[in-house]
Image: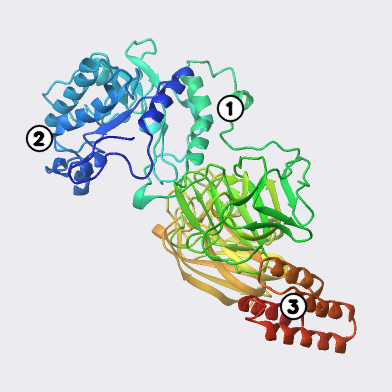
C-alpha cells in the first residue's frame, strides 16, 4: 500500500516491489462493493510486522522467543513494551481510516495478531487496545486472527462485536472463543489452507473432497458448532504465498487464481448450507462449469478461435492470418513487409498490431526470425501497456543480458541461448500451467541458473509484434500460435517402450497418484513413481526402458516430485545397450534436492536398451514425477536452393552492404543450382563463391556473417 510514512532512517513504509496507490485501493473497495463483495484490509501486527520494523528498527522485539521458534522470528515482531509501538501502529491505521473519504471505506478492518511468539500478557493487552481502537474510536467492524487460546492469560481482551477467525484450533479453541463472546469464522488450516508448491499444507484444495466431506461448522479438533448459533459467521478458505524473497518459487497470480477459482464453487455450496447428498459431485461440477466466469471477464486469457490454431502469419506472403480466425495484421508503425522475406522491424518504436490481447496456457508459439544484430534490448512481443515495472508479459529476442527471455508477474527470466545475427532461427515458446519452455530449432533450452524458478507460468502477449520502445531489429518470417498441450516430437512415446523398475510401491497409499512406475511416464507432474515404502530391497534402484528399435538418443529428462522431497534423486548413473546384455555408462552425476527439472545429454548415442540407476535418493527412497527419453534432434540445414533467400535477407538487414556484391553472390549460387549433377561444375562454383565471400569479408560483408556463410557452404559440400 502507498503510505506517507517514512522512517527517520529514510525507509518508506510503502512497499518498493509493487503497491496499490491509495486511490486505486479506494476504488478497488468500491468496485467490489458494487458486486456484493467486502474487501477486508489487514495490517498484521504485532507479529509478521517486518515492514513496520524496517521503518522503525528501534521497535523490534528484544525478548525471549516462545513456541519453540528460532530467534530470527524477532526481526518481524514488535516490542510491545516500547512506549512508541502502539502510537506508531495506530498512526498507520489513521492514515487509511480518517478523513471525509477514507482510503478504507466502510468495510471490516482486520488487525492481524496471529503467530506472535512473545509473552502472553503484553500480547493480550496490545490486542485489546487495538480492538477497542478500531471498534470504538473508528466505529468499524473489527476482525482478528485467533490466538487467544495459545496466548491465554489474566489480561482481559474485549470480545463484543469482534469477529475472530479460527485458523488453528491449537491457537484458538472454537468452543472457548464462543464462550468468551467472539463471533467466529471457520478458516481451519488443517482443512482449507493452500500454500502453492510449498511442500506443506495443501497445494490445492480438492473440490470433490470439499463437496463430499467438508462441513463449515465442523473444526479439526472435533468441535461442531450449531449452524443457527448467531456467533457462528460461516467458513472461508485461504491461499498464502509463503514462498517469497529468498524462498521464491515462481508462483504467479495466474497460478493463484487457478487454485482459488477451482475451490470457490464447492466451498460456496457448503457454506450456503445446500444439501449435497442428493446431487453427486459429478453433476454439481458440471453445473459449476456451465456457470463459468463472470460476464465480460476473461481471467484465464482465452482467445476465441474456430479450431486450435490462433494465428498463422506467413509474412513472406503478406499480412494475412492464414488461420480460420481472420486476425489479420492491422496497424503497423515503422514496420514493413518485404516480399518473399518477411516483416522487417527496425528497433526502437517498430511494431505490428494483431488486434488480439493475451493467451493463457496451454499454448505454443513458433517464431522464425533473423536478427540484424544482437545489441541492446530487443522485444519480440508485448502488451500495449507493458512497461518497466514488468507487471505485464513481454517476450525478448534479446533481453538486457543478451538472452532470449521474458518478463511476467514482476519477474524476469532468461533462457540460456543468445541469438546470432544473420542466422535464421525458429523459437518455440511452450506455455503450460507453472512451466514455460523454449525450444530453439527443436532443441530445448533451459533457463539460466540465475533466473531459474521451479515454476514459471507465462501468459503469451499477442497484442503487439515488436515494441513501442525497444523492438527487434530484424526480419520475422513467420509466427504461428496454437492452443493446446505441446507434444515434443523428440519424446519417445512410452507406449512403444517396455518399462520396468526394480522397486515400486503398488500396495500402499493411493496408487493412482503415487507408487507405480507407470506414473513417471504418464505426462502428469502431479502423479509420481515411488520406490517401496519398506525400502526392501534397498537402494540402488533401476528403471529399465526397452525401445522398439535402436535409436540415436538426444537426452533423458527427470522431473522430481513437485510436492515433498521424499525420494528425490540426488545421485544417478545412466547406462545404454544395443543388445540388452552388454551395457556401458553414458552419464553419471549428482543433483541437489530441488524440484527443478534435470536433463542428461546423451549426444546421439545409439541404444535399444536404457538403464537409469538411482544410487541415492532423499531419505533412502527414489521417486519421480516424470521421466522422458528423447531421440536426437536433426538440426535444420540451409540447402543450396535456400541460400539465395539467406543472401537477400542479409542484404535487407545490412549485413551485405553493396547491391552489386549481392547480385554477384546470387549469380554464383544460381550457377551452382543449375550445375545439379555435374560434380566438377558444382565444386568450381562453390570455390568461386567461397573466394568472393572471403574477399568481401569485413568490407561489403559483415565479418561475422561471412563466417556463418562459410560454415553453411562447408555443410553443403
Of pointers 1 and 3, the one earlier in the residue sequence: 1
Q: Nearer the viewer, residue 464 or 451?
A: 464
CA gap, disc 2 and disc 3 = 83 Å
User: x, y (%) of residue 104?
Assistant: 33, 23
Image quarter in which the N terminus is found: top left
Front of the two marks 2 and 3: 3
* Left or right position of 417 against 660: left
User: Element type at marker 3?
Assistant: helix
- Image location of residue 27, percent across then percent down: 42, 25
Q: Which mark is residue 293?
A: 1
Residue occupied by mark 3: 661
Q: Is residue 566 visible?
A: yes
Residue at image position (55%, 47%) is 458
| Residue 531 appears in view | no
Query: Where in the figure is residue 103, as x and y percent of width and height?
Result: 33, 25
Question: Which label sits in the foreground, 1 or 3?
Answer: 3
| Neighbours of disc 1 within 10 Å: few (<14), some (14-19), many (20+) | few
Q: Callout 2: helix, strand or loop?
A: loop
Q: Quadrant of the C terminus?
A: bottom right
Give the structural element (helix, strand or loop) at label 1.
Answer: loop
10 Å neighbourhood of mark 2: few (<14), some, or many (≥20)?
Answer: some
Q: Quadrant of residue 276?
A: top right
Query: How far apart in space, not on screen, are marks 1 and 3 (Cα)?
Result: 60 Å
On the image, numbered disc 2 is attached to which residue? 81
Against 654, residue 366 (above or below) is above
Please state which of residues 366 and 4 is positioned toward the viewer in this rendering.
Answer: 4
Where is 688 relative to 511, above or below? below
Amino acid at each position: 500500500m502507498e503510505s506517507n510514512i517514512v522512517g527517520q532512517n529514510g525507509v518508506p513504509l510503502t512497499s518498493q516491489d509493487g503497491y496499490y496507490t491509495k486511490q486505486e485501493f479506494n476504488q478497488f473497495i468500491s468496485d467490489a462493493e458494487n458486486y456484493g463483495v467486502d474487501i477486508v484490509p489487514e495490517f498484521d501486527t504485532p507479529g509478521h510486522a517486518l515492514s513496520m520494523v524496517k521503518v522503525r528498527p528501534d521497535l523490534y522485539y528484544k525478548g525471549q522467543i516462545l513456541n519453540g521458534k528460532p530467534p530470527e522470528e524477532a526481526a518481524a515482531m514488535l516490542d510491545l513494551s516500547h512506549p512508541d509501538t502502539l502510537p506508531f501502529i495506530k498512526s498507520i491505521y489513521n492514515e487509511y481510516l480518517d478523513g471525509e473519504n477514507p482510503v478504507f471505506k466502510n468495510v471490516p478492518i482486520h488487525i492481524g495478531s496471529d503467530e506472535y511468539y512473545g509473552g502472553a500478557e503484553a500480547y493480550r493487552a496490545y490486542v485489546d487496545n487495538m480492538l477497542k481502537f478500531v471498534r470504538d474510536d473508528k466505529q468499524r467492524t473489527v476482525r482478528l486472527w485467533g490466538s487467544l487460546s495459545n496466548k491465554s492469560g489474566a489480561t482481559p481482551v474485549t470480545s463484543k462485536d469482534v469477529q475472530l477467525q479460527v485458523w488453528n484450533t491449537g491457537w484458538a479453541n472454537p468452543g472457548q472463543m464462543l464462550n468468551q463472546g467472539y463471533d467466529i469464522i471457520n478458516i481451519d488450516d488443517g482443512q482449507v489452507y493452500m500454500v502453492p508448491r510449498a511442500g506443506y499444507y495443501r497445494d490445492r484444495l480438492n473440490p470433490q473432497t470439499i463437496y463430499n466431506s467438508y462441513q463449515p461448522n465442523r473444526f479439526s479438533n472435533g468441535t461442531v458448532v450449531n449452524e443457527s448459533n448467531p456467533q457462528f459467521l460461516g467458513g472461508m478458505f485461504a491461499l498464502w504465498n509463503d514462498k517469497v524473497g529468498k524462498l521464491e518459487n515462481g508462483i504467479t497470480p495466474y497460478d493463484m487464481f487457478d487454485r482459488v477459482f477451482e475451490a470457490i464453487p464447492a466451498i460456496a455450496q457448503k457454506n450456503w448450507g445446500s444439501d449435497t447428498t442428493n446431487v453427486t459431485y459429478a453433476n454439481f461440477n458440471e453445473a459449476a462449469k456451465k456457470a463459468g466466469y463472470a460476464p465480460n471477464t476473461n481471467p484465464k486469457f482465452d482467445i476465441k478461435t474456430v479450431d486450435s490454431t490462433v494465428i498463422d502469419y506467413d509474412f513472406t506472403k503478406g499480412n494475412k492470418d492464414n488461420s480460420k480466425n481472420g486476425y489479420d495484421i492491422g496497424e503497423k508503425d515503422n514496420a514493413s513487409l518485404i516480399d518473399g522475406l518477411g516483416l522487417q522491424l527496425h528497433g526502437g518504436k517498430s511494431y505490428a498490431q494483431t488486434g488480439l490481447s493475451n493467451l493463457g496456457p496451454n499454448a505454443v508459439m513458433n517464431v522464425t526470425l533473423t536478427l540484424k544484430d544482437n545489441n541492446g534490448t530487443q522485444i519480440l512481443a508485448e502488451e500495449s501497456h507493458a512497461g518497466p515495472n514488468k507487471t505485464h508479459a513481454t517476450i525478448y529476442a534479446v533481453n538486457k543480458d543478451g538472452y532470449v527471455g521474458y518478463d511476467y508477474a514482476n519477474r524476469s527470466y532468461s533462457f540460456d541461448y543468445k541469438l546470432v545475427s544473420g542466422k535464421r532461427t525458429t523459437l518455440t515458446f511452450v506455455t503450460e500451467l507453472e512451466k514455460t519452455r523454449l525450444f530453439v530449432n527443436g532443441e530445448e533450452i533451459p533457463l539460466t541458473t540465475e533466473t531459474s524458478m521451479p515454476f514459471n507460468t507465462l501468459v503469451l502477449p499477442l497484442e503487439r509484434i515488436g515494441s513501442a520502445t525497444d523492438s527487434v531489429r530484424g526480419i520475422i518470417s513467420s509466427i504461428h500460435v496454437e492452443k493446446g498441450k505441446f507434444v515434443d516430437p523428440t519424446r519417445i512415446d512410452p507406449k512403444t517402450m517396455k518399462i520396468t523398475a526394480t522397486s515400486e510401491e503398488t500396495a500402499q497409499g493411493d496408487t493412482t497418484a503415487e507408487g507405480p512406475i507407470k506414473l513417471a511416464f504418464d505426462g502428469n507432474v502431479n502423479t509420481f513413481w515411488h520406490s517401496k515404502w519398506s525400502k526392501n530391497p534397498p537402494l540402488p534402484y533401476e528403471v529399465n526402458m526397452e525401445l522398439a528399435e535402436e535409436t540415436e538418443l538426444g537426452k533423458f529428462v527427470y522431473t522430481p516430485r513437485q510436492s515433498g522431497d521424499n525420494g528425490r534423486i540426488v545421485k544417478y548413473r545412466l547406462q545404454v545397450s544395443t543388445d540388452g546384455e552388454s551395457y556401458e555408462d553414458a552419464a553419471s552425476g549428482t543433483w541437489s534436492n530441488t524440484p527443478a527439472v534435470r536433463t542428461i545429454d546423451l549426444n546421439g548415442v545409439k541404444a535399444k536398451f536404457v538403464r537409469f540407476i538411482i544410487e541415492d535418493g532423499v531419505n533412502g527412497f527414489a521417486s519421480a514425477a516424470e521421466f522422458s527419453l528423447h531421440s536426437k534432434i536433426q538440426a535444420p540445414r540451409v540447402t543450396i536452393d535456400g541460400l539465395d533467400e539467406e543472401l537477400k535477407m542479409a542484404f535487407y538487414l545490412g549485413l551485405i552492404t553493396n547491391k552489386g556484391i549481392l547480385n554477384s553472390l546470387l549469380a554464383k549460387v544460381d550457377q551452382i543450382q543449375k550445375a545439379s549433377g555435374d560434380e566438377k561444375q558444382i565444386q568450381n562454383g562453390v570455390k568461386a563463391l567461397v573466394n568472393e565471400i572471403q574477399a568481401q569479408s569485413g568490407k561489403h560483408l559483415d565479418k561475422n556473417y561471412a563466417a556463418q556463410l562459410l560454415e553453411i557452404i562447408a555443410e553443403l559440400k
